[in-house]
Amino acid sequence: MNKNEFLSALSGKLATLPQAEIQKSLEFYRESIEERIEEGMTEVEAVASLEDLDIIAERIIYETPLPVLMKERMKPKGGMTIGIVVLLILGFPVWFPLLLAFGISIAAIYIAIWSIIISLYAVVNLLITLSIDSVFLLINLSLNVFMSGGIININIPSSYIFFMFTAP
């Protein structure tokens, strides 16, 4: 394997790294091979004297700092192209009313749920109030009927009910 084949193979194995890290590693090994050639080795011997390509690539990847790796992985792969912008502008008459209808539907469902909750609260509160009033009304009526022994007209202002009872 000559120098160019070695460097291209190393570049392929380091493809997951940021481009700056790949260039730095390739430059280091290019200089290392050239130094060995200057010492009297042939290009093939200089490449053969290096470690195995997989071991070199693995060591470079492990020595790369984690923030550098994460920065490269988290980088967005592309922005909005002109075609997407044109599509958004031309599709506005279609997607905007749909988006607006969806938002209004969600708001209507939210209001309907709260209306049901408030209505149930009012009904339960009314039933509790009426049951308490009816207990007091029955106690009041039974005492009045028992004591008077005749026709009784009772006007209850809280519930505005007019009762007429006759005693036996």
Image (cartoon, rainbow, N blue to C red):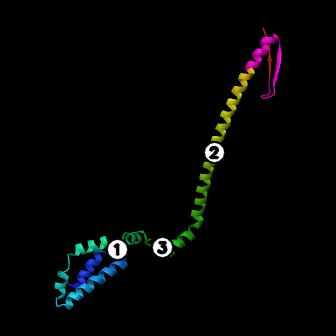
> What residue type is disc 3 on?
Gly
Residues at badges 1 and 2 in contact (C-beta under 8 Å)? no
For mark 1, does the 10 Å Cα neighbourhood hold few (<14), some (14 to 19), or many (20 or more) residues?
some
Secondary structure type for disc 2: helix
Q: Quadrant of residue 167?
A: top right
For mark 2, does the 10 Å Cα neighbourhood hold few (<14), some (14 to 19), or many (20 or more) residues?
few
Residue occupying the point 51% across, 71% down = 84
Q: In the drawing, does residue 43 fall left or right of residue 146? A: left
Residues at badges 3 and 1 in contact (C-beta under 8 Å)? no
Is residue 112 depicted above or below 168 in this figure?
A: below
Label located before the other in sequence (1 or 2): 1
Residue occupying the point 29% across, 74% down = 60
Label located before the other in sequence (3 or 2): 3
Between marks 1 and 2 in the image, the one whose residue lies nearer the viewer: 1
Residue occupying the point 22% across, 75% down = 53
Q: Which residue is mark 1?
A: 17
Secondary structure type for disc 3: loop
Residue 151 included in the magenta stretch of the image: yes
Q: CA distance from mark 1 to mark 2?
A: 54 Å
Q: Which residue is mark 2?
A: 114
Label located before the other in sequence (3 or 1): 1
> What residue type is disc 1 on?
Leu
Q: Which residue is mark 3?
A: 79
Secondary structure type for disc 1: loop
Is residue 46 depicted above or below 18 in this figure?
A: below
Residue range in magenta is: 138-161
Q: In the drawing, does residue 98 fall left or right of residue 71? A: right
